Amino acid sequence: MGIEDLYPPQRLVAAQRATAAAGLDALLLSPGSDLRYLTGYDAHAGERLTLLVLPAEGEPTLIVPTLERPAAEAAPSTGVRIVDHPDGTDPYPLVAAALGGPVDAVGLADRMWAEQVLALRAALPDARQRLASEVLRELRIHKSPAEIAALAEAGAAIDAVHARIGEWLRPGRTEVEVAADVAAAIRATGHVTVDFVIVAAGPNGASPHHGTSDRPIGTGEPVVVDIGGTMPSGYRSDCTRTYVAGGRPPAEFLDYYAVLHDAQRAAVAAVRPGVSAEAVDAAAREPIAAAGHGAAFLHRTGHGIGLDGHEEPYLVAGNDRPLAAGMTFSVEPGIYLAGRHGARIEDIVVCTTDGVRRLNTTPTELIAL
Ligand code: ZN
Ligand code: ZN
Ligand code: ZN
């Protein structure tokens, strides 16, 4: 599938319709995943203003710094009118001009910089500011076949890195040394950026978002390796496996790893259309709690993934939203024993019309290196 399948121009029309239905006059999207989703443009985020002005009705305008114009014109989904502003001029009057008249309510990209939010408030003093996610969340949560293909490609690329961990992860090497080799492999498998590399050995494995450290990896220590990056498509990978480098891990670790393995499998198996996000979380949590480790599973079971590494839907207690075909998310329960060790197993999955498809396919058993 080509890039034009990933970023179809008619998405702008669908977004305009949804903008009108939400009672908004326009979306104002600064560089980030929403802008890329609608235009294919992977815009540079800087102090100069880049902004897609998408009115509920009428022609969209992409406002860019003059020096970014060639990059904007080269974006895959063209056809949007581009207006540029040279350095030293005030770009904000261009926003009002692109809107063509007074507006009551605008939806801003959720992660727009505060300095731009405030400048837009000054430029459009009568417009209430709301979040663009009110409109775009529903569009982005349902992935197209091309998006699922892009996520599958990302999954295969990160699987190829996990399949080679044994080349780099050895007792005596530090987490930082292992992570440097892993990061190079993430690039070598086709990712354009390395988004994170967690190599967490022994007690560091009990901290879910530990990065790396200069601590050497001990013989027989469990090591949590959680890695991900962004592909040229814009879509992301994210996969965790737990390893043991040489020697035998502690018996209590082997006991709870078996529980975790069953819990992750049960949660993946629970995924199908109509099942709620929180039911999948519960499917992971119940066997872990039954084994007495409920408090040690200290985060939600998963998060959506696409152009953002973390997006809707979130698999968490309280989210009763039914899953639907085309939703993509992680299933990643973990057990963390402070001061000792931890484990996590993470796959990206797609909810299909009749069940689930895993986009990470390397074995989820504890891997002895
Ligand atoms: Zn995380
Ligand atoms: Zn992860
Ligand atoms: Zn994740």
Image (tube, rainbow, N blue to C red):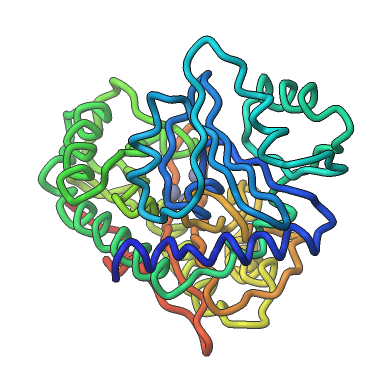
Residue at the far top in the pictured view = 88
Where residue 105 sits, quadrant-wise, is: top right
> Quick check: 26 left or right of 52?
right
Q: Classify residue 140 by image quadrant.
A: bottom right
Nearest to the observer: residue 161 or residue 22: 22
Q: Is residue 92 above or below residue 16?
A: above
Q: Nearer the viewer, residue 311 or 69?
A: 69
Expressed as whole percent of the image width and height from the top left, the position of residue 31 reads: 52, 36
Q: Residue at x 53, y 18 (%)?
A: 47
Q: Residue at x 28, y 20 (%)?
A: 214
Q: Position of residue 277 (x, y in %)?
A: 66, 68
Q: From this viewpoint, is residue 87 visible?
A: yes
How many numbered tags mark residues here? 0
Q: Give above or below for 151 relative to 215.
A: below
- Residue 296: x and y in percent read 59, 48
Quadrant in the picture for the N terminus: bottom left
Task: Determine whether 184 is above or below 13 in the image.
Answer: above
Any part of residue 343 in sight: no
View extreme (bottom): residue: 354
Q: Residue at 76%, 68% (x, y): give it.
A: 320
Q: Quick check: 237 left or right of 60?
A: left
**Residue lying farthest to the left in this orientation:** 167
Where residue 151 sits: x, y (%)? 37, 63
Residue drawn at x 26%, y 47% as measured from the top left:
191
Judge from the rendering whether residue 352 lies leftward or rightward of residue 317; answer left or right: left
Q: Where on the picture, by quarter, is residue 220?
A: top left
